[in-house]
């Protein structure tokens, strides 16, 4: 099976073989590319974004990761404009990860689309499944998001739950 066929199958949410040689190689390639990006810290933004475009599926304008960025495949990650991730971001993208415009990540944010099979024999054989992640809400630090959170809300906790809707009262009047 080709890498593209594996990726398409993984997006269905069905169990897939996480140990398939094509996936193992794609992970190794992503480590090499993310190391290259991480080593470029301090270089001009345009140069760093060009490196990101070799790793990620879609990269908007003004996208910045502090060291160190880690991703599983990279190609299933789409990032909008004006994105910033603080230190030690991990994006495990067996399924698509979509990050919109004007999104900020705190330190050590981890987005994990995949989960291993629970049955010990299936897990040992490489059984995994994945579900897509799309960012459109404000999530509190330390939260563990296990299900959909609607856009336009503040959510936090373990497990994460909606605390309230964002309202005009959240505006502070800040203007640079």
Image: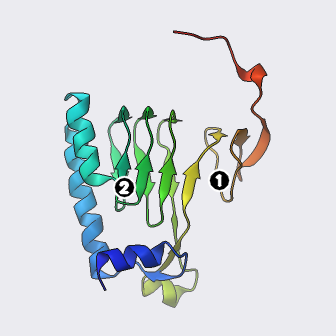
| Vertical comparison of 9 with 147: above or below | below
Which residue is rendered at x = 71% and y = 48% of the image? 150
How would you rate the neighbour count of disc 1 (Cα within 10 Å): few for under 14, some for 14-19, many for 20 or more? some
Q: Secondary structure at mark 1?
A: loop
Task: Say the numbered circle drawn on residue 145.
Answer: 1
Residue 110 lies, in percent from the top left, at: 49, 50
Q: Position of residue 89 (x, y in %)?
A: 42, 45
Q: Is residue 85 visible to us here?
A: no
Q: Quadrant of residue 46?
A: top left
Side (left or right) of 108 relative to 62: right
> Where is mark 2, residue-wise?
71
Q: CA distance from mark 1 to mark 2?
A: 19 Å
Q: Quadrant of residue 68?
A: top left
| Label annotation for residue 74 | none
Q: Residue at x 43, y 51 (%)?
A: 78
Q: Give the camera-side residue of 61 and 171.
A: 61
Residue 29, x across and y down, in percent: 23, 62
């Amino acid at each position: 099976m080709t890498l593209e066929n594996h990726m398409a199958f993984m997006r269905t949410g069905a169990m897939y073989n996480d140990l398939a040689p094509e996936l193992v190689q794609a992970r190794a390639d992503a480590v090499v590319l993310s190391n290259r990006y991480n080593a470029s810290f301090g270089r001009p933004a345009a140069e760093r974004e060009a490196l990101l475009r070799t790793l990620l599926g879609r990269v908007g304008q003004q996208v910045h990761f502090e060291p160190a960025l880690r991703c599983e495949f990279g190609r299933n990650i789409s990032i909008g404009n004006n994105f910033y991730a603080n230190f030690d971001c991990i994006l495990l993208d067996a399924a698509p990860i979509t990050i919109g415009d004007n999104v900020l990540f705190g330190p050590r944010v981890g987005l994990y689309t995949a989960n291993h099979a629970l049955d010990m024999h299936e897990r040992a054989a490489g059984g995994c499944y994945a579900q897509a992640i799309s960012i459109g809400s404000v999530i509190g630090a330390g939260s563990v998001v296990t299900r959909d959170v609607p856009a336009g809300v503040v959510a936090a906790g373990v497990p994460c739950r909606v605390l309230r809707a964002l309202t005009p009262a959240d505006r502070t009047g800040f203007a640079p």
